[in-house]
Amino acid sequence: MTRLDCSVEKCAYNDDNCCRLKRIDVKGAEAKISSETECGSFADRACDCAKSDAGCACKDTDVHCDAVACKFNDDHNCSANHIGIAKNCTSDHCDTECASFEC
């Protein structure tokens, strides 16, 4: 398992920078930089409503990863001891990214 920190406050699974999911998916099969990745498990919490009831928030998470160029990708599983999911904002929209991606 990977130690995961998530700074995407608007995700329904985020609970004080911890993910309530036991497994997440990182997308970005052709990614060469972190901004070309995204958390495929992100669910928008459109308001500051109650968090998703997906389970207890924890730091240890299984990470399935499609970013095959990442040095931590081991047969579509993340082998990093610690990763961060962060906001990736441009002038017209916000998304998520795996901030720990290394080509």
Image (cartoon, grey):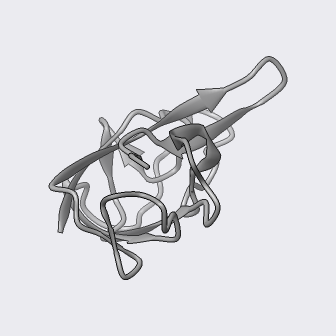
Q: Is residue 79 above or below residue 83?
A: below
Direction from residue 66 to residue 15 in the image, left or right: left
**Residue 56 point in image, percent of width and height:** 24, 61
Q: Which residue occupies the extreme top position in the image?
A: 91
Q: Is residue 35 above or below residue 66?
A: above
Going 40% across and 67% down the picture, which residue do you hit? Answer: 54
Nearest the eye: 74 or 85 = 74
Going 57% across and 42% down the picture, which residue do you hit? Answer: 96
**Residue 64 point in image, percent of width and height:** 41, 73
Nearest the eye: 40 or 16 = 40
Q: The N terminus appears in which quarter of the rendering? A: bottom left
Direction from residue 71 to residue 8 in the image, left or right: right
Direction from residue 34 to residue 94 in the image, left or right: right
Q: Is residue 52 above or below residue 74?
A: above
Nearest the eye: 41 or 44 = 41
Image quarter of residue 24: bottom left
**Residue 63 point in image, percent of width and height:** 35, 68
